Image (cartoon, helix red, strand yellow):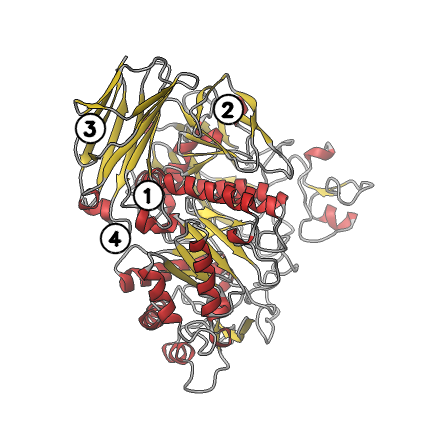
Amino acid sequence: MAPDSRFDCARDKAVSQSECEQRGCCYAPGSDSAGPPWCFYPGLYRGYRMGPLMPTLHGLTATLTRAAPSYLPRDISVLRLDVTEEATDCLRITMKDPSSPRYEVELPAVVVREETDAEDLLYTTEYQPDPFGFIVRRKTNGRVIVSLEVILQPTPALTWIALGGILDLYVFLGPDPQSVVRQYLQVIGYSMMPPYWSLGFHLCRWGYTTTNATREVVQRMRDAEFPMDVQWNDLDYAYKRRVFTFDPLRFGDLPEMVEEFHMRGLRYILILDPGISTTSPPGTYAPFEDGLKRDVFIKNSSGHILIGKVWPGPTAFPDFTNPETRSWWEDCIRDFHSKVPVDGLWIDMNEPASFVQGSVEGCPDSELENPPYTPSVVGGQLSSGTLCMSAQQKLSTHYNLHNMYGLTEAFATHSALIKIHGKRPFVLSRSSFPGIGRFSGVWTGDVRSDWEQLRYSIPAVLQFSLSGVPLAGADVCGFGGDTAEELCVRWMQLGAFYPFMRNHNDRPNAPQEPYVFGQKAQAAMKSALNLRYSLLPFLYTLFHHAHTSAETVARPLFMEFPSDPGSQTVDEQFLWGSSLLISPVLKRGAVEVAAYLPPGTWYSLLNGRPLHSRGQYFLLSAPLDTINIHLREGHIIPQQEPALTTTASRTNPFSLTVALSAGGWAWGDLFWDDGDGLDTFETGNYSYIVFVAGESQVVSGPLTVGEALAGLVLGGLQVFGLQSAPIFVLANGQMVMDFTYCSEMKVLKVTNLALPLSEVLTIRWIL
């Protein structure tokens, strides 16, 4: 077998030739141990044999049997195959041991399975009985979607390596990428609707050591006129680093500080780690003592509380799969909130992370701790930097539940905040799992302050977006190491287009708040922040569509242009929705950027200059104060005059930016509500407006009008791609005096309007 076609038959350990051949595999050593595997499966390696396919209510079932055992211990000789037709565009294939039930992840009941007719299915399935294999094809053209083939195929190929358990595969037919994402989210659940204020700028540092230091940061941001909505504190606030406490000396007036922030239209968030200190003197730390009484902590294999070690020292870990734990967690948050009225919670260290391997007492020598195959994890063991795999939780062992710890904590925290606030909650989680977007946003962890991490942050945020977590971002300017002024400016420009934007810094590093840099750098940062704040109505509308229709917010180009070859590999640019293209500078010293523009006309959001693309790269000017943003022809985006907080900006006049197509048409929309009410869309307490341009006019049509729209007005608009200068402009039939036309850029600007958005509006230009 050719070296590049080999499938490794010894992932569990290095084996000799005789050991390899005893496994029924081939042995061919090479000169490089890092090259193709020396021990590899033969092309006709025998697997399972499939029995007759039998019909079930929603698909087919069959029995799979092994003729001979493999080299792995505890082989399962008989498997049950279930093929479920979930929908016309979704197929589910499950293989499990019918004689030994295993833990299975419970999926949310978010959609009802469709009753499907075989003629309507978008796929066909083919089965090879001996040795077992299956192929899923697209019915329209016969293209193979999935093939785990009988003959071990040459590269390229995808190999799944599992420690055990159940193989549960979903096949989504699309046919386009956005449809695949929607079909996936119909299984794991659509994302939550974030509070409006959470889309503003957030500022944090591990190292704001007192309330006065925190106040000073807020005041300096305000004095320098930087927009900001949320001030954060890392673990500095906690007494001896114990969560649900605040230091009586350094943060003794924390409640008063938070109320001051609220009076200024700001919000406040602090960190909340899951590790609960176990060493406080008796009667001094209710979270642990109450948790002991209510039996909420994860146990070790002998039934005693598992003790790890995190920031406060020896710690116990809540088991969020236990309903009583979720109730206790809510009580802890409620009690703390009654003293410190936080607006959201940042759940960190929730992999769960521990500074000792497994526990302070180690872990037992068992198959859960040392399985036949261990993936390439940091530390070389599954319990490295976390809990023992044999630890006991309510639903199952930690071995089965480890990857879901952050998800279960996010669910508990989200639910608690709803009950305590009675408003839309904000939760930010470091650990994630499919479905976490229903309860939380995420950030990309402790990134370094360097240009490489700046570039990598784009595909990282886009991967979260494709996975149903639209509220995502990286630590702006980097978390670890000292940033540089140019790097921080470019990161602030890019970060202004992360769906979640937070500047966060580690303790030993140089300060990186926007106000610490030179005047030119500050001006560039301020420009980027003001641009973001002006676009928040558009961003909020995108989140509405993500919440209700599984649309993506930050979007890779291939999602919107799947048939354009040039868009397939672009990972240094991205879109907001279908219409706004972001092309940041990602290299030190660059004052130009090579930006790919998919086919069509794209207008600079800065001045309306059009670029007509056949699907090609353009070299764009990008001095330090500029990030290139382009609006796609045929689209209208709503904007709002920015302010220092969203509390203030939400009362300002709106504007429209209209990018006409070659035929003179464009379309856009606006979703608007109170910004933090629960289920406003589901209960009808919202406004939804559609904007249409065509035939020398723009019409605004409110389809639904809610209370939050009252008093808000359209203050102006700009029209890109208007080929001739208007003679005059009419707004609802009345002559408009304040308009200009730039013949070089073909841009019409209309200002000083005051038209109620709750009514039908028509702005017409006469050529």
**Residue 283 location (% of width, % of height):** 41, 86
Q: Mark 1 to mark 3: distance in Å? A: 28 Å
Which callout, 1 or 3, points at the residue further toward the start of the chain? 1
User: Which residue matches tag 1?
Assistant: 547
User: Could you tell me the amino acid type at mark 3?
Assistant: Leu
Displayed quadrant of residue 546: top left
Q: Outermost residue toward the right?
A: 31
Q: For the residues carrying marks 1 and 4, which lies nearer the camera in this image?
A: 4
Q: Are marks 1 and 4 in contact (CB under 8 Å)?
A: no
Kindly identify the residue that appears in the image at 48 percent across and 30 percent down: 557
Which callout, 2 or 1, points at the residue further toward the start of the chain? 1
Does 6 sit above or below residue 388?
above
In the rendered view of the protein, which quadrant contains the N terminus?
A: top right
Looking at the rendered structure, the secondary structure element under dot 1 is: helix
User: Which residue matches tag 4?
Assistant: 678
Q: Is residue 36 visible?
A: yes
Q: Mark 2 to mark 1: distance in Å? A: 28 Å
Dot 3: few (<14), some (14–19), or many (≥20) neighbours within 10 Å? some
Q: In terms of depth relative to the viewer, which is nearer, 571 or 163? A: 571
Q: In terms of depth relative to the viewer, which is nearer, 292 or 215? A: 215
User: Which residue matches tag 2?
Assistant: 597
**Residue 121 location (% of width, % of height):** 35, 28
